[in-house]
Image (cartoon, rainbow, N blue to C red):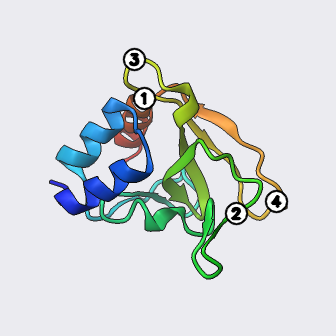
């Protein structure tokens, strides 16, 4: 179960889809790593305790304490595979859920592709890969 302080900090930053927010509150992992060929270098799924810090290097530069230009403001990184981010698109919340997008890092610019139609579908995929 997630720490209330972590959830409060998350709630101050984003209005998350209900399905993902419920997952963080009730099933927030300390650290989930899925070692599967499906994910380059395995998949790290973030819990509430690490979600804010997980944005570092993607949407936020902690050294300069600035938002990184070129990152879609409505994307929240919820997992990574070899530093390739998996993001919820907060601009597309529908029926309490949102699609998951991914992109390869190190390409010079982000080119996101839809990976799953919803966070729930993403969890189902992870469960099959585990």
Q: Secondary structure at mark 3?
A: loop
Residue lying farthest bottom? 63
Indicate the quadrant where residue 106 lies. bottom right
In the foreground, 93 or 111: 93
According to the image, label 3 marks what residue? 95
Work out whether residue 38 can be spotted: no
What x and y, as percent, mark residue 45? 40, 55
Calculate the distance from the C-alpha at mark 3 to the C-alpha at mark 2. 30 Å
According to the image, label 4 marks what residue? 107
What x and y, as percent, mark residue 125? 43, 36
Q: Secondary structure at mark 2?
A: loop
Residue lying farthest right? 108
Marked residue nearer the N-terminal end (1 or 4):
4
Work out whether residue 44 can be spotted: yes
Q: Secondary structure at mark 4?
A: loop
Marked residue nearer the N-terminal end (3 or 4):
3
Q: Is 46 placed left or right of 102 in the picture?
A: left
According to the image, label 2 marks what residue? 68
Calculate the distance from the C-alpha at mark 1 to the C-alpha at mark 2. 29 Å
Q: Secondary structure at mark 1?
A: helix
Marked residue nearer the N-terminal end (3 or 1):
3
What x and y, as percent, mark residue 60? 60, 65
Bin the neighbour count of mark 1 within 10 Å (Cα to Cα): few under 14, some 14-19, many 20 and up. Answer: some
Question: What residue do we see at 40% from left, 38% from top?
Answer: 16
According to the image, label 1 marks what residue? 121
Indicate the quadrant where residue 47 lies. bottom left
Circle nearer the viewer, 3 or 4? 3
What x and y, as percent, mark residue 117? 52, 25
* In contact (CB < 8 Å): disc 2 and disc 4: no
In the foreground, 72 or 65: 65
């Amino acid at each position: 179960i997630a720490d209330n302080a972590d959830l409060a900090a998350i709630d101050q930053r984003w209005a998350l889809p209900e399905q993902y927010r419920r997952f963080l509150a009730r099933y927030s992992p300390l650290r989930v790593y899925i070692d599967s060929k499906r994910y380059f270098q395995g998949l790290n799924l973030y819990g509430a305790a690490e979600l804010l810090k997980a944005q570092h290097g993607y949407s936020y530069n902690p050294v300069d304490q600035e938002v990184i230009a070129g990152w879609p403001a409505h994307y929240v990184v919820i997992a990574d595979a070899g530093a390739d981010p998996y993001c919820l698109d907060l601009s597309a919340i529908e029926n309490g859920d949102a699609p998951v997008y991914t992109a390869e890092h190190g390409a010079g610019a982000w080119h996101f592709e839809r990976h799953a139609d919803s966070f729930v579908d993403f969890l189902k995929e992870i469960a099959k890969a585990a």
